Amino acid sequence: MEQTFIILKPSTITRGLAGEVLKRFERKGLVIAGIKMMQLSEEILREHYAHLVDRPFFPWIVESMMRTPVIVAVIKGDDAVAVVRTMTGATNCRKAAPGTIRGDFGMSGQENIIHASDSPESAEIEIKRFFKPEEIFDYTPLTLPVLYAPDEV
């Protein structure tokens, strides 16, 4: 099964939405393979958002992402990257479809609730950036036979 990476941003933590967001992934049938709360540093944010470091708004990203601890998680499932991205919705919450995480819980382009890996390659890099191998668990949920057909797992 494919793995992807998410960050529940400070706007999620501050508003008490972490459980609600995680519950959506679980209800979909995705598996939480690793999860922890952490305080991000400017160093890790510079690495994670390297493509934005030279943009004039980057200092605001750093300030925003360090406002509170965040929750980082590894989510597992068939086509996990695409499924999580679809569930997350458009980056700008005002443009995100109702029913998506950002569409239901956000109003901002920047304070947009969640980060989700945009490709399997990015997911692999981001998972390694935030998790040690022993912090990711490989287990089979008892619900697997009712979530997937036998040829899908």
Image (cartoon, rainbow, N blue to C red):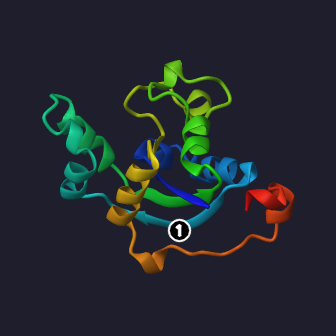
- Farthest right residue in view: 146
- Residue at 68% from the left image edge and 30% from the top image edge: 99
Tell me where residue 74 appears, x and y as whole percent: 51, 61
Q: Identify residue for label 1.
A: 34
Does 42 sit above or below residue 130?
A: above
- Farthest bottom residue in view: 134
Q: Give the quarter of the figure containing the N terminus.
A: bottom right
- Farthest top residue in view: 95
Q: Is residue 76 left or right of residue 72?
A: right
Which secondary structure, mark 1? strand
Q: Is residue 29 left or right of residue 119?
A: right
Instruction: Look at label 1 and name its amino acid.
Output: Gly
Q: How many marks?
A: 1
- Residue at 37% from the left image edge and 57% from the top image edge: 126
Q: Give the quarter of the figure containing the C terminus.
A: bottom right
Tell me where residue 20 appears, x and y as whole percent: 65, 48
- Residue at 43% from the left image edge and 54% from the top image edge: 123
Q: Is residue 149 left or right of residue 69?
A: right
Tell me where residue 10 appears, x and y as whole percent: 41, 47
Tell me where residue 66 appears, x and y as whole percent: 29, 50
Does 91 sit above or below residue 81?
A: above
Does 39 sit above or below residue 136?
A: above
- Mark 1 crowd level (few <14, some 14–19, many ≥20, 10 Å Cα): many
- Considering depth in this image, is 15 or 116 the residue closer to the camera? 116
Based on the displayed image, in which of its 4 quarters is residue 82 positioned? top right
- Residue at 57% from the left image edge and 58% from the top image edge: 2
